[in-house]
Structures are given as C-alpha cells and as structure tokens.
C-alpha cells in the first residue's frame, strides 16, 4: 500500500499559509505547518523521506539550506511557490536542489496536489539516477585504486589508454610514461607477432576472454610472474581490457610443492624399506627399488599387479581384510606382520604399515604401504622357539624320569617309618621322616616342572572356556585351607576365553593359591575380577597380605625364585614363572602391582581377540 504524502508548509505569512492549507485539506493531505525554520527542521527529521514533500513559500538562502544535500542530492523534494516570476530566484532554487518552482495563480493552486505528487515522483527518479551514478563513480574509483593491475589499451596501436593505480604502482612507471608504452614493453617473453596471435580470437570474437601466464618486467628491470586476463571492448575507439594478477606467491607455493615432491621422490628411491603406492583395493601403482628387490619383481611387472599377487596364499585373506578396513575408514592405519611370496617362489616376512590418504586435490584416495624386511628376525624367532621347545621337551623328560623312582623312595621311607618302627631308634625314624618330606617336596617340584614344560604344547579349544567356572573349581579344591583359615574370596564377572582349560586352571590355581598361602592371614577378602583397556582384557587377583618387597618385584616371575614372604610357606618357586609363560604364549603378559593400602594385585593381560563373541555380548548386554 502506498503511504500518504505528508506535506510540510514553510512560509512567512500565516494568512497565506491558511489559504493554501484550506485548499489542500480538501485534497486529503496530512498537513504540517512549520512555525519557523527551526520547527521545520525538526519536522523534516520526523517524517520519512519517502513521504515528505516540503512546500516553501519563500526562496531565501536559509529556507533553501533546509535541503542540506548529501553527496549533492537533497534528502527530500522541495517545491517553491513564489508570487511572481523571478528568474534569478528560480535559478538559485533549482541550483540548491529544489525540484520545481511554481508561480502563484488560481490554476497553480487548483493543480497543487498533482504538482506535489509529481515532485515526489520526480525526486524519487532523480534519486535512483543519482545513486546509480554514485555507484558507478565509486566502482570506478575502486577499480582505479585497486592493487590489481588494470589497463585498457588501444586495439589498433596497442598503446595504453587507462592505467589504474595498482598497475602504475606495480610496474614502477608513472601513468604519463605508460601512456607512451604498449603491453609489449612490459612482456619480455612476447614479441608483437606472438601477442597478436593471443589477441586474434578476441578480435574475431571467437572468445569472450583469454587467460595466460607470462612474466612482466618492472621499470627497475625486475621480473615477476603474472596471470593475464584479457577482453575486447567494442567501444569507440575499440580497446582491450587487461587485468593482471601478480602470481609470485602462487608460484612460490608451487615451487615449494615441487621441492617437497622431489624430496619425497628421493626418499622413495633411496629408502632402505619397501614403499609402494597402491589403490584402496591394493592395486600397485608405483613401487620403489627396495620393494622391487624385496618382491623379486621389476617395477614394470609390479605395476598393475594386486598386492595379493605378491602375498603368501595363507596371508591373502588377512590382506584383503585390512584393505577393506582402510577403505571403509574402520582403521586409519594398519600395522601387520605378513608373508610375501617372491617371484622366485621364496617366502619373505615383512612388517607392513599401510595408510590411505586423499590426493592433493582431495578427489582420489590412494594408499602408501611401507614394508620392512623382517625375514631374518622371523627366522631367528623360529629358531628360538624351536630351542625353547627342545628345552621344554628336555625338562619334561627329566622331570618325568626323575618322578618314576621317586614314588617308591617316598613309599619305602613311609612304609619303614610306619610298619617297621620297632626296628629303628628315634634318630633313624627322624631321618626316615626327612627322606619322606624331601621326597614329597621333590615330587611337587617335578610336578610343577612338568606343568611348566607342557604350557606351550596344549591344544587350542574349539569353543570358549568358561573362566568363571574354572575359578569356582579352583576355589572348591582350596575349600580345606579356605575354611580352615576363614579366608574369603570375592569373584566378579569373568569373560569366557579361547584358551585351553588346563592353562586357565594353572593361572588361577597359582594366583589364588598364592593369595591363600601368603595373604590368607590378612583377614580381608581377596578379589578376582576383570577390566578392559583398549584392545586388552586384564584379569586380576588382588589380596591385602604382606605384598611383594620392591627389590623382589623383578624376580618373582623367575623359575625357582622364592621371596621373603615364602620363608614360612612351602613351595617350589615355579608357579609365577608358569603364569607368565602362559600369558606370553598368548601375546599377553603378567605382572604385579601393590594393592592400595597394602598387598599384591597380580594382573594377567590378554589381547581382546581371545574373548569369545558370547563374552562380548555379555559385556555390552
Ligand atoms: P612359590 O609360591 O612356590 O614360592 P611362586 O612362583 O608362586 O612360587 O611365587 C614366587 C614368590 O613370590 C613366592 O615365593 C613369594 O615370595 C612371592 N609371592 C607370590 N605370591 C604372593 C602373594 N600373593 N603375596 C606375597 N608374596 C607372594
């Protein structure tokens, strides 16, 4: 809805104002009559410019000063109504920004309302033009002062016509000097013919614009790289418009990138590790000399092959799996020990680290694989394993063979002591008891040694073993000492494990047995439970007994080591060695910590992969 015009009447004679007001009131204008110039100024500030028309009945300079043009344009339309034709006053008023000057007559008054509406329309139109001109002027000014170089040059003579501030600034010539020059004077790499070749598609209107990179030479002779954009403007006389961007920074960044590429290339070429660039599906895109040597293939043979083709058949499924994990972002980087199959059929072990990254323009993913040759290390490890196996077998045989004659020795000593006691004096009977006790100790030692030697030779279970049940069985076996010593043990949740039952039994037999033997007297219950930590599951057996003296901490897991706490307690010093051997066999570890407030907390750490799916479900459910 168009808002009504508000008319402000300014004039010296109140009689005259009255007369005009009466006429206008009939035409429905909200009318304000200014009581003097100060009041007029205040009213002007209150009425929105879009609606205000000022009708002045006097043309003195103070009244005209109400117009206060901003940027040469008055803030509102003013109409001047004078008694009789007065050319100098009219010119003055128009100069000051008055929209129209009316001479008083009955017709003028009859059509005053139309004149007022026309004045407002005219003012609005002029304001639009003024703003457009103003914008153009400002834009021109911005271009002129821009630091980007902008030139126009004559299409015929190629001489510069207009040169902006940035251009003069960058090239170091004054505008006067430049007006006698052509773009060729700035472009040492181009001659007239070459420049014309570039301009031709513009002249023929085949192209809207052209863009090229070249060097510009400053007045002081220094050169700088530029990107030139040129257009043809069909004005009179026709000109070319050139916008020049100084691309020194961009060039420097490109050079840096090239340098870092070169560095990568030299690392790639000389690294003492295999480096391969692969697609996220494992297709080999590039391989360095070390990788070629490692795999036995030439580079051109490798490119296009899949990494599976150079992987040992037994490790192919794992390889496919980890590429899938990388592709789907499940793993940002994969570290794996795997076997490679060389061209000559030999097997090599490698430690591979693979990560996938987006290329420079973020459009494609590629993977970088780093392979270290660990064949020798693996061979040494296998030899060591074999030696350990031999040692286990030896210990097993010796313990077994020693145990055979031991049973009758103990049996005979016991028989003589109990059935033929009359034949011996008390000293001889004591000696027989000693033989019997030592025999039993030796038997326990041999039993423990047999267990220790057997650890690495137990069959993996097909189904997860219920750890909690094994612990309950151990506790049942210990029912005697537990009841006798009024010893309490609290058992928490324990996840089933893919670990042979005999080994789980050994672990808890030893740890709970120790807690009972060494810490039973403490009075406080021992606790058995588990915790998760990253990719590990940690079982613990915590007691509140005497604890392990710090100096013994590194030794108690050694075979035959017996600590200070063991002085009054019989044992073989093999239990904890067996515990550690079992955990390490399954890529875990065992250690002891001090229980807060005193006592020992033994921890058994295993990789989470030893947990069954059912155990996982129990945990989360
Ligand atoms: P053994 O118990 O037969 O001596 P272990 O290998 O089981 O052999 O333990 C080695 C030593 O560690 C023990 O002799 C004892 O000194 C110490 N030890 C083991 N468990 C505990 C415990 N819960 N509290 C205090 N000392 C312990």
Image: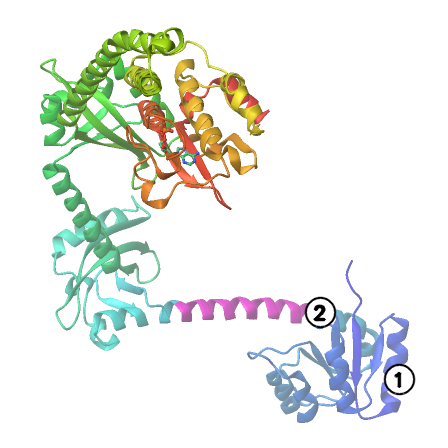
* The C terminus: image quadrant: top right
Q: Residue at x 45, y 26 (%)?
A: 513
Q: Is residue 493 visible?
A: no
Quadrant hosting ligand 1: top left
How far separated are the C-alphas under marks 1 and 2? 26 Å
Q: Residue at x 75, y 90 (%)?
A: 37
Residue 371 lies, with reference to residue 459, above or below; the image says below
- Does 134 lie within the magenta span? yes
Tell me if 298 is positioned left or right of 39 in this view. left
Tell me if 448 is positioned left or right of 92 in this view. left
Q: Where is residue 357 in the image (x, y as percent from the top left)?
A: 32, 36
| Mark drawn on residue 87 | none
Residue 210 lies, with reference to residue 123, above or below; the image says above
Give whichever of discs 1 and 2 has the lower sequence position: 1
Tell me if 538 is positioned left or right of 51 in this view. left
| Mark drawn on residue 19 | 1
Displayed quadrant of residue 21: bottom right
Task: Write the start and end of the magenta stretch as one range.
Answer: 121-142
Q: Determine if the C-beta at disc 1 is less than 8 A from ligand 1.
A: no
Residues at discs 1 and 2 in contact (Cβ within 8 Å) = no
- Does 96 lie within the magenta span? no
Q: Where is residue 162 in the image (x, y as percent from the top left)?
A: 30, 69
Residue 244 lies, with reference to residue 130, above or below; the image says above
Depth order, front residue of 468/295: 468
Residue 604 lies, with reference to residue 216, above or below; the image says above
Displayed quadrant of residue 248: bottom left
């Amino acid at each position: 809805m168009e808002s009504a015009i508000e008319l402000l009447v300014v004039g010296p004679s109140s009689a005259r104002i009255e007369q005009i007001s009466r006429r206008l009131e009939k035409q429905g204008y909200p009318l304000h009559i200014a009581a003097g110039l100060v009041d007029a100024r205040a009213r002007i500030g209150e009425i929105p410019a879009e609606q205000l028309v000022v009708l002045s009945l006097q043309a003195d300079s103070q009244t005209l000063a109400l117009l206060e043009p901003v940027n040469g344009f008055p803030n509102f339309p003013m109409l001047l109504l004078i008694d009789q034709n007065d050319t100098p006053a009219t010119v003055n008023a128009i100069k000051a920004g008055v929209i129209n000057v009316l001479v008083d007559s009955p017709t003028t008054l009859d059509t005053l309302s139309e004149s007022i509406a026309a004045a407002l329309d005219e003012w609005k139109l002029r304001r639009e033009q003024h703003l457009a001109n103003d914008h153009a002027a400002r834009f021109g000014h911005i271009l002129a002062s821009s630091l980007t170089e902008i030139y126009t040059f004559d299409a015929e003579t190629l001489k510069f016509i207009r040169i902006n501030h940035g251009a003069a600034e960058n090239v170091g010539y004054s505008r006067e000097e430049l007006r006698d020059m052509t773009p060729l004077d700035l472009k040492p790499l181009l001659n007239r013919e070459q420049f014309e070749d570039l301009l031709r598609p513009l002249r023929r209107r085949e192209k809207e614009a052209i863009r090229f990179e070249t060097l510009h030479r400053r007045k002081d002779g220094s050169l700088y790289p530029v990107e030139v954009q040129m257009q043809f403007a069909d004005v009179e006389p026709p000109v070319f418009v050139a916008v020049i961007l100084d691309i020194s920074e961009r060039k420097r960044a490109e050079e840096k990138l090239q340098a870092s590429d070169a560095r990568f290339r030299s690392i790639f070429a000389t690294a003492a590790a295999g480096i391969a660039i692969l697609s996220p599906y494992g297709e080999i895109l590039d391989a360095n000399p070390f990788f070629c040597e490692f795999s036995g293939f030439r580079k051109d043979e490798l490119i296009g092959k899949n990494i599976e083709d150079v992987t040992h058949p037994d490790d192919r499924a794992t390889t496919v799996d980890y590429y899938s994990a990388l592709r789907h972002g499940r793993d940002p980087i994969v570290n794996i020990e795997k076997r490679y199959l060389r061209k000559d059929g030999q097997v090599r072990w490698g430690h591979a680290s693979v990560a996938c990254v987006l290329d420079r323009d973020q459009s494609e993913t590629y993977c970088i694989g780093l392979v270290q040759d660990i064949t020798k290390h693996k061979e040494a490890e296998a030899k060591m394993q074999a030696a350990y196996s031999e040692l286990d077998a030896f210990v097993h045989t010796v313990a077994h063979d020693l145990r055979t004659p031991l049973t009758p020795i103990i049996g005979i000593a016991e028989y003589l002591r109990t059935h033929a006691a009359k034949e011996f004096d008390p000293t001889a009977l004591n000696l027989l008891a000693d033989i019997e006790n030592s025999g039993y100790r030796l038997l326990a030692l041999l039993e423990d040694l047999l267990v220790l030697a057997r650890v690495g030779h137990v069959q993996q279970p097909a189904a997860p073993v219920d750890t909690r049940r094994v612990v309950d069985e151990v506790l049942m076996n210990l029912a005697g000492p537990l009841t006798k010593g009024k010893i309490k043990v609290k058992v928490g949740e324990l996840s089933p494990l893919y670990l042979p039952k005999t080994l789980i039994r050994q672990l808890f037999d030893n740890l709970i047995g120790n807690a009972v033997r060494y810490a039973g007297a403490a009075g406080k219950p021992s606790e058995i439970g588990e915790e998760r930590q990253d990719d590990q599951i940690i079982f613990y057996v915590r007691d509140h007994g005497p604890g392990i003296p710090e100096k013994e901490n590194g030794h108690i897991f050694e075979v035959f080591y017996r600590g200070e706490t063991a002085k009054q307690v019989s044992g073989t010093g093999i239990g904890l060695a067996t515990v550690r051997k079992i955990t390490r066999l399954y890529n875990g570890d065992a250690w002891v910590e001090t229980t807060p407030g005193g006592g020992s907390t033994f921890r058994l750490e295993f990789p989470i992969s030893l947990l069954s799916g059912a155990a996982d479900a129990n945990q989360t459910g």
